[in-house]
Image (tube, grey):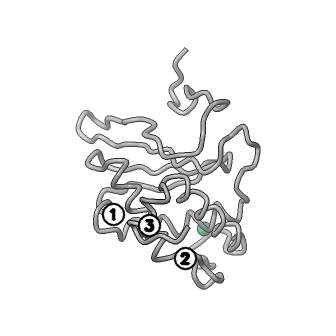
Amino acid sequence: MKSVVSSFDVDHRTLREGLYLRSTYQINDKLSVLSWDMRFCAPMDHKPLTPGAVHTIEHLMAYWLRLDETIGHSIVSFCPMGCLTGFYLSTMNDVTAEQIKAALGRVYAKVFPIHGKEDIVGMNEIQCGNPSLYDIEGANEAMHKYVGILFSPEEAAAAGLKL
Ligand SMILES: [Zn+2]
């Protein structure tokens, strides 16, 4: 039976790391919103991200992707998966996977590696519900690995990424 939650229709036993268009939501028959699965960890590898790394990446990506010149204006939300294996990026339907990948590369080149809590946008008591939950090393490692999954060595070199 097809589930009302589209990700429940994906067989997570065979899902690998990557960037996937998970579903398209039609809202009031007018707006078309895309839900992208940014899968950092293969579920069956049983090596999810640390909660601190997830929270750190959430803050940085939610902020920096919105400033990206190509896709920033089309971003609806950037949210962590509760299973700690990735994130959901919601966008308007004028964005392609290639554009998202390129934007991720630009954010990675500009922001990572981070060196301390002061590099994490909004990680303070005023702007966040749990500012002591962060993981500098875990976030750097997770982003490095994910960009290495999305970009071939040739693509990374062309984009000026150090992998
Ligand atoms: Zn927070």
Q: Quadrant where the C terminus lies? A: bottom right
Q: What percent of the width, then of the height, locates residue 49?
A: 70, 56
Position of residue 157 relative to residue 82, above or below, is: below
Q: Give the residue number, with chain letter if any, for mark 3.
A: 157
Crowding at mark 2 (Cα within 10 Å: few <14, some 14-19, many 20+):
some
Q: Could you tell me which residue is drawn at 65 percent across and 42 percent down?
A: 42
User: Label 1, on which residue?
Assistant: 72
Q: Quadrant of ligand 1?
A: bottom right
Q: Name the amino acid type tagged 3.
A: Ala
Which one is nearer the viewer's eye here, 77 or 155? Answer: 155
**Quadrant of the rendered image containing residue 105:** bottom left
Disc 2 within 8 angstroms of ligand 1 (CB): yes
Residue on which disc 2 sits: 122
Q: Please say if the residues under marks 2 and 1 sit with CB atoms less than 8 Å apart.
A: no
Task: Give residue 15's position: percent from left, percent from top.
Answer: 60, 35
119 and 149: which one is in front?
A: 149
* Dot 2 amino acid type: Gly
